[in-house]
Amino acid sequence: MAHQLPDLPYDYSALEPTIDAQTMKLHHDMHHGAYVKNLNAALEKYPNLQSKSAEDLIRDLNAIPEDIRGAVRNNGGGHVNHTMFWKIMKPKGGGDPSGAISEVINKTFGNFKDFQTKFNEAGVKQFGSGWVWLAGKPGGEVQIISTPNQDSPISQGLFPIFGNDVWEHAYYLKYNNRRPEYLAAWWNVVNWDEINQRLKAFQSHPEPALAGR
């Protein structure tokens, strides 16, 4: 298959009590697995697209044949978003950011607490399913945005430095409909080391053509 489901970098139960093992298993194996399966199915009739990375596919959706564009947007986006998501979390994560990401947050938002508040508010206000992001702009600045469904900032020429999944399947078993509670708890498993690596990649190539790499 052109695209494969990546392994989780930790056990299903590793993020408890913030995210329970059953949610992680369903989220990774079933939901992310379905995006990968459906993306591969969409690409079957276009062998020339099968060698492209998922990031490249969603970077210019207008270049994707119209009959599979929606499937690539949804499933390619879901694959890219979740591949990032597993990596930016870790057991015993969280705490205050350090290094370059701390400097960027303080410069742009004043301090980490104010940034958290704005980020969580954007996640709460995202109607229905979607994501909330800290995204890098082509000029090198960063902004908080939300996207519906599995849309990626990459498709807007932005760089997804990190994001939180606010689809109900990410939190419903433990938090039910209490999305604000999930958003607040999620900071306890954030992997700032990985986020600093993603920020470094963005700062090295802030132009939109390389977004997501």
Image (cartoon, helix red, strand yellow):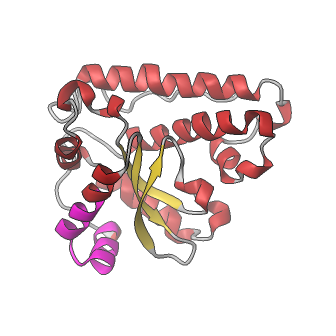
The residue shown at (28%, 69%) is: 102
Rendered-image quadrant of the N terminus: top right
Residue at x 20% of width, y 69% of height? 114
Q: Is 36 placed left or right of 144 in the picture? A: right
- In magenta segment, residue 193: no
Residue 165: quarter of image: top left
The answer to whether residue 25 shows anywhere in this view is yes
Tag count: 0
Picture residue at 54% right of the left edge, 50% below the top: 152
The main secondary structure of the magenta stretch is helix
The residue nearer to you, when weighing 74 against 4, is 74
Question: In the figure, 113 relative to 67: above or below?
Answer: below
Residue drawn at x 46%, y 76% is 141
Q: Position of residue 111 (x, y in %)?
A: 21, 74
Residue 97 appears in view: no
Q: Give the range drawn in magenta.
A: 101-119
Q: Which residue lies most toward the front here?
A: 127
Expressed as whole percent of the image width and height from the top left, the position of residue 89 reads 31, 43
- Residue 53, placed above or below residue 105: above
